[in-house]
Image: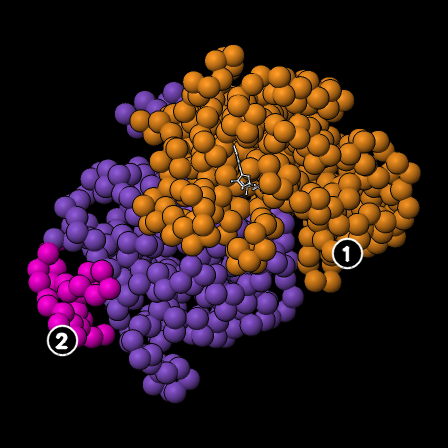
Chain colours: A orange, B purple
Amino acid sequence: MYTTHELLRFATAGSVDDGKSTLVGRLLHDTKSVLADQLDAVERVSRDRGFEGADLALLTDGLRAEREQGITIDVAYRYFSTATRSFILADTPGHVQYTRNMVTGASTAEAALILVDVRHGVVEQTRRHAAVAALLGVRHVALAVNKMDLIDFVEGPYLAALADFGDVATALGITEFTPIPDSALRGDNVVDRSDRTPWYDGPTMLEYLERVPVGVNPASLPFRMPVQYVNRPRTPSHPDFRGYSGRIASGVVRVGDPVVVGPSGIQTEVTGLEVLGVPVIEAFAPQSITVILRDELDINRGEVIAAVDEPPSVVRDLLGTICVVDDRPVNTGDRVLLRTGTATVPAIVRGIRDRLDLTTLARAQAEDSLCLNELGTIELRLAQPVAVDPYSRLRNSGSFILIEPQDGSTLAGGMIEV
Amino acid sequence: METTGDLLSQARRTLTYLDELESEAVHVFREVVGEFDRPVLLFSGGKDSVVMLHLAVKAFAPSPVPFPVLHIDTGHNFEEVIEYRDRTVERLGVRLVVARVQEWIDSGRLRERADQTRNPLQTIPLLETITAGKFDAVFGGGRRDEEKARAKERVFSLRDEFGQWDPRRQRPELWDLYNGRHRPGEHVRVFPLSNWTELDVWRYIARERIDLPSLYFAHEREVFQRDGMWLAPGDWGGPRSGETVIRKTVRYRTVGDMSCTGAVESGAGDVATVIVEVAASRLTERGATRADDRMSEAAMEDRKREGYF
Ligand SMILES: Nc1nc2c(ncn2[C@@H]2O[C@H](COP(=O)(O)OP(=O)(O)O)[C@@H](O)[C@H]2O)c(=O)[nH]1
């Protein structure tokens, strides 16, 4: 049964007190993913705090600081599965100053569940969350209109929230989204369908998660594989084996395919493919493979093996939208390291073109720096060329991080525009 | 059934979730070997470390595994686990480094605890062995589903020169761009099984037909009850007055120091029945079997800060 199970990675977002922790707890609880000892602990603490019943929000706030302050400060990952799918949930906190966390959670998510409190509708935070989802290329968006129990499950305020979010989505280029009226506290339309929303005939939250398409057809995108590691056993059984190991970032590759290696530009042909030691004639994203090429070549970690007919761009100047994720700002003139695919190269921040206001979605003239949780377009000059793609086309070969060269901190995450 | 599923997914060019988790873990292994000078894999003979080693073998085939494995030996071992450990490293031709907690106690660098539990004593030998071996990346079998503090752990988790983990200073991990940069003296803990659940691990063991120490399966054993757990007497100690030893059919869900690893009553004699049992279990793996994790809600977080696994 589990052998045909697919995996969906999704992220949740909502501003403080909209009920995100409760919703996540409810999803875990109603899919029977919470075990007895965890539930006991939650019930005990809930009683101590004078909560009637179990406060499901307690299931998900992990670290001591969070317990003390009662807020979620870091991305946490949750796991649950149903008869048809396994889920990895990136649970991202909603504070203004934690845009960083939402960006982190969204970077690997295929779907985003954005939460609003039906009494407040779309607020500034909602707009920011939708903007991050759109920027990061999250393919599917659902709008959970929560706390329906507090307005006796009437349709009007739900429709208002939906219309407001529709305007935000249109402005962001989000072409479709799925609105769901729910009560995380009471469990309506989360896992179990509510009989208190007879006017609603869309999916429950779980139905949505089980049906939203996973991934893209690998054949629809060009082949890319960053070389992670050159495999040369030099053992008696494999004296001359030379393979290039990596995980396919996009597309399909077959034995006999002509390929180009970037940034060097060398052209050659695939003469063998192995998926974890087993020879195959075809492999596709996101398989981890080892490629054998026709010619004896000097190819290293950091290069990309790619389709000849649609090669990546080889560039030394980059334009990208970044989100700063460190306490230190990114400034014009900074010397940093750029990491993309498996390549790490020194880079200089040549300039900061604009700052993106997540609330108004306007791009404003920027000064010479971007601070923690700020987004903006920057120009980078690289010490060596890299093979990359626009993020909007290929998420994996269009993403990068900036690293502080002295202590190695991750300063920013970025999406390549050209 | 397995084959049909695999063929179907091959035809549609989608990966099953186990294949995706496998591919992700292999990617992590290869990143580490590509970026670090001296990786090492923590190998206890427990199922998570066994699955890690299996993945490492697949990641680097046809080359041998390009790093040694490290066992922090509390001295309170299950015999069959040590036998399994030695047989496995021999079969794979990997180098085994053993750090014995007993040696630290004998030389006075560590003191035995009143409760005789040695799990918390592993931290110092672990850190000192990492320093002495100049290991810069340390693979651990931790999974985020194990426990709340682990749910926020990164795949690449930076430790300072004291081996400490600071949850507030973790690097955000974006896309699959793992950042392994570190300063001299620092090292990185790497968790290739971050996104696996206990059930995933068992299903993978079934699919790959991975050999495990026999104590993971139902067997008869002399046990006694302490704090609601079934412990097995051994060199580490045994029943106190009022605790009686009886024979029971049990198995282990985790493998660790004998003084604080409890057996569960179970008739599950093979992988298939274990999977059924795990799927139906109403207790977390740690809640059921680890005395040290039940001490307090923050027990794990505190030990992680100090540099524990
Ligand atoms: N009435 C009602 N209260 C809710 C609902 N969901 C959450 N809450 C309450 O709203 C408050 C904030 O919820 P919490 O999940 O901690 O919000 P978070 O800050 O978004 O994680 C808590 O008191 C919850 O019990 C809901 O659907 N209905």
Question: Is A412 included in the stretch rendered in magenta?
Answer: no
Identify which amino acid the numbered label 2 is placed on.
Ser
Residue A188 numbered tag: none
Task: Give left or right: position of B299 versus B275.
Answer: right
Q: Position of residue A96 (x, y in %)?
A: 71, 44
Residue A107, placed above or below residue B254: above
Residue A328 numbered tag: 1
Residue A388, placed above or below residue B63: above
Residue labelled 2 has its Cβ within 8 Å of some atom of ligand 1: no
Q: Position of residue A330 (x, y in %)?
A: 81, 51
Residue A87, placed above or below residue A51: above
Task: Give left or right: position of A161 versus B304.
Answer: right
Q: Residues within 10 Å of mark 2 (few under 14, many from 20)?
A: few
State the separation of the CA atoms marked 2 and 1: 60 Å
- The quarter of the picture showing ligand 1: top right
Question: Closer to the camera, B145 or A71?
Answer: A71
Is residue B230 among what the camera can see? Answer: yes
Question: Residue A296 lies in what quarter of the image?
Answer: top right
Identify which amino acid the numbered label 1 is placed on.
Arg
Q: Look at 27% across and 43% down and name the residue there.
A: B281
Give the residues in magenta.
Answer: B219-248
- Image quarter (top left, top right, bottom left or bottom right) of the C terminus of chain B: bottom left
Q: Look at discs 2 and 1 and give the one toward the viewer.
A: 2
Q: Residues within 10 Å of mark 1 (few under 14, many from 20)?
A: some
Which residue in the structure is indicated by mark 2? Answer: B241
Task: Give left or right: position of A14 versus B94.
Answer: right
Q: Chain of mark 2?
A: B
